[in-house]
Image (cartoon, rainbow, N blue to C red):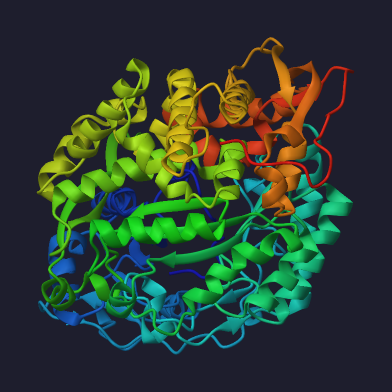
């Protein structure tokens, strides 16, 4: 091997295929190996090894079992004949050691002498030395941005990604970083972070100005904001926002403890970072089984209450079908989170990651995990490489049954997850939520009614198809699904199969069943109010407010995914909904419960418009993701809903005519 040969990085499979065609066999080719590119990397590796036997193929990444017996099986089942070495643990130093060794020795002579470099030798033995010691100071690793290695990837499609620290002090069994190896947190010097962010910002500036790129930054830290150094990182991000107009949104998981420190850091980039309260579950038994005892769930809940002061949105994460879970426990967690006031709940199915404790055979047996296989959304394709067609699809293993959650309960929870994502997340029906909360009604009661009340035909169709596709995407046998997926790659690429169901069906609800959904939201709200004796007579002022509010939110969402300029929509305004929401933010529940405080003396007119800036933002994302429900569903995970929904403006007209102070009474 000649170390003088240039090093190249590849993100796109097509670019790697072109390089192999043009340049011939590389000395060494290394593949990252994650859940989202495992089969793709294996397909390339198999072809490279078959066509270029002299090339050394190296894999590295977390998609690798923890225990030696399972690692041996993994080599037999997936790696043998395709991969020469697998780097376990951190890759930078171990991979460098391997390259230096291969410069002096033939790869067949390397048998377990390099920490972390596993290889299955011709003698039938898996040589698996322990991982190399962790890197204690991340700045010892040169920055690929500052070295210019990432310049070609500023193409308007990819999102710049940085890491300011690595490791996690928590021990969650479902996470690869929950293992002992990653318990220590290694940090990067603040000067290198500053240089990287400004380097990126200078290159993003023109792309963002012309609407040619997503105005985002991804930080891959596991607990951002929890460490003192993160405060300085946020100040640098704020500098970049002022100098370059980038980033508008910072996607990052904020810290699970140290609430005040997290809030202080996030306040530096007001509104760019959403505070996360990733509880996964709030049931004590479930938390104990997944080793989250050292995470203060109560403090996570407090994040929602303090977020408005930091100028940040909030979201929490919940995983369905964790060990010890049940339908009641899952719905109970959702209730506590919406009652705490989180803006958005991200709901996931439990995926078993090979590098996690939960994926081991012993853990599965102990907790009674029953799993199925599915194709991962967006992780499939067909590629021409060295004159051959490679068809690949990535699969993940999801838990669908635990002892106290039969599959039917799992299915019902998924439907509730969809309704919550569609009606609650992002303040889709914010005025209705404000009214409910003012009367001490949990939003979960409203969502439960939305699930059980009669649905209009368009909404009923969407929900029925969601339930059917939930069943249809799950397979018992991994090999059978892999064969099917590679034979039907075109259908997956076209968006007819393999979609993220929550994202896709949320989009379908907005685009295909919006009228039914707004009507259901209003009826469920009125039913919940009547259950406590409010508006029981029908035709009341509060009913007029609820109906107008539901229609208001329908118009805000109408036709927002059209690529051509949509028409201006109008509504008669009998209530001042902006003032109502401002009153809710001030927590003035007594005033909020009297609808006369928000009634216009004479009706006005609202206009609902999409601004040119919003249309440019939408065009940028739709061009990249497409206009299918699947593509738009992805869009909704990348932009904030308030940034793309219609703006509301009132025509000049009368103000409100509130009741005299002290005379208002709730309408019942």
Q: Nearer the viewer, residue 496 or 126?
A: 496
Q: Is residue 232 left or right of residue 312?
A: right
Residue drawn 15% across and 63% down? 404
- In the picture, the quarter occupied by the C terminus is top right
**For residue 130, above or below residue 521:** below
Asked whether, in this view, residue 588 is left or right of residue 382, the answer is: right
Q: Is residue 35 visible?
A: no
Question: What percent of the width, then of the height, locates residue 538?
Answer: 49, 24
On the image, the x and y values in percent for residue 14 come to 45, 38
Asked which quadrant contains residue 611, the reply is top right
Can residue 449 be seen? yes
Up the image or down, 317 lies above or below 563; here it is below
Residue depicted at x 36% and y 38%: 449
Q: Is residue 327 left or right of residue 154?
A: left
- In the rendered image, the vertical position of residue 81 relative to residue 155, given as above or below: below
Q: Is residue 154 above or below residue 84?
A: above
Report the residue at 28% width, 26% height from top: 491
Image coordinates for residue 426, horizontal then vertical, percent: 58, 43
């Amino acid at each position: 091997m000649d170390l003088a040969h240039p090093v190249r990085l590849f993100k796109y499979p097509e670019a790697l295929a072109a390089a192999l065609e043009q340049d011939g066999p590389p000395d060494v080719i290394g593949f990252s190996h994650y859940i989202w590119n495992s089969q793709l990397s294996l397909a390339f590796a198999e072809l490279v090894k078959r066509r270029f036997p002299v090339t050394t193929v190296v894999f590295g990444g977390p998609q690798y079992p923890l225990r030696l017996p399972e690692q041996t099986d993994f080599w037999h089942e997936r790696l043998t004949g395709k991969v020469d070495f697998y780097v376990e643990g951190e890759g930078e130093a171990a991979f460098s050691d391997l390259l230096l060794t291969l410069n002096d020795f033939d790869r067949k002579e390397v048998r377990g002498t390099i920490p972390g470099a596993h290889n299955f030798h011709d003698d039938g033995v898996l040589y698996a030395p322990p991982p190399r010691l962790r890197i204690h100071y991340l700045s010892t690793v040169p920055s690929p941005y500052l070295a210019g290695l990432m310049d070609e990837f500023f193409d308007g499609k990819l999102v710049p990604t940085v890491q300011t620290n690595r490791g996690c002090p928590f021990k969650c069994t479902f996470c690869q970083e929950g293992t002992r190896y990653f318990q220590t947190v290694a940090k990067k010097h603040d000067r290198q972070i500053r240089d990287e962010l400004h380097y990126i910002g200078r290159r993003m500036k023109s792309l963002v100005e012309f609407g040619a790129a997503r105005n985002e930054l991804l930080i891959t830290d596991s607990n951002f904001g929890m460490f003192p150094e993160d405060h300085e990182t946020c100040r640098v991000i704020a500098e970049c926002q002022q100098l370059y107009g980038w980033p508008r949104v910072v996607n990052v998981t904020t810290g699970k403890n140290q609430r005040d420190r997290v809030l202080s850091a996030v306040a530096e980039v007001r509104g760019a970072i959403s505070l996360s309260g990733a509880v996964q579950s709030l049931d004590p038994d479930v938390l104990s089984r997944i080793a989250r005892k050292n995470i203060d769930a109560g403090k996570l809940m407090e994040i929602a209450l303090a977020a408005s002061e930091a100028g940040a949105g909030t979201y929490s994460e919940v995983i369905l079908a964790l060990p010890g879970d049940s339908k009641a426990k899952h719905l109970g967690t959702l209730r506590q989170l919406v009652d705490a006031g989180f803006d958005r709940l991200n709901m996931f199915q439990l995926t078993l990651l090979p590098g996690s404790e939960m994926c081991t055979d012993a853990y599965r047996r102990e907790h009674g995990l029953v799993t199925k296989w599915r194709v991962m959304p967006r992780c499939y394709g067909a590629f021409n490489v060295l004159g051959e067609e490679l068809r690949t699809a990535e699969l993940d293993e999801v838990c669908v049954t635990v002892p106290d959650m039969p599959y039917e309960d799992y299915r019902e929870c998924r439907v509730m997850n969809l309704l919550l994502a569609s009606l609650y997340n992002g303040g889709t029906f914010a005025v209705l939520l404000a009214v409910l909360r003012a009367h001490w009604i949990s939003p979960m009661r409203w969502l439960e009614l939305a699930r059980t009340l009669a649905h209009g035909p368009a909404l009923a169709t969407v929900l029925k198809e969601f339930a059917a596709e939930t069943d249809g995407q799950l397979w018992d046998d991994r090999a059978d699904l892999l064969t099917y997926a590679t034979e039907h790659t075109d259908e997956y690429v076209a968006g007819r199969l393999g979609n993220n169901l929550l994202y896709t069906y949320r989009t379908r609800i907005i685009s295909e069943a919006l009228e039914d959904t707004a009507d259901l939201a209003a009826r469920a709200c009125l039913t919940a109010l009547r259950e406590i004796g409010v508006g029981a007579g029908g035709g009341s002022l509060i009913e007029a407010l609820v109906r107008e509010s539901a229609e208001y939110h329908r118009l805000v969402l109408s036709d927002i995914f059209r690529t051509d300029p949509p028409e201006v929509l109008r509504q008669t305004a009998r209530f001042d909904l902006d003032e109502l929401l401002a009153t809710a933010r001030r927590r003035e529940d007594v005033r909020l419960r009297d609808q006369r405080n928000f009634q216009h003396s004479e009706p006005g007119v609202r206009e609902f418009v999409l601004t040119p800036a919003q249309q440019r933002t939408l065009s940028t994302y739709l061009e990249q993701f497409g206009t299918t429900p699947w593509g738009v569903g992805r869009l909704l995970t990348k932009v904030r809903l308030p940034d793309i929904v219609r703006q509301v403006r009132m025509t000049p007209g009368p103000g409100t005519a509130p009741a005299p102070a002290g005379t208002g009474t709730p309408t019942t």
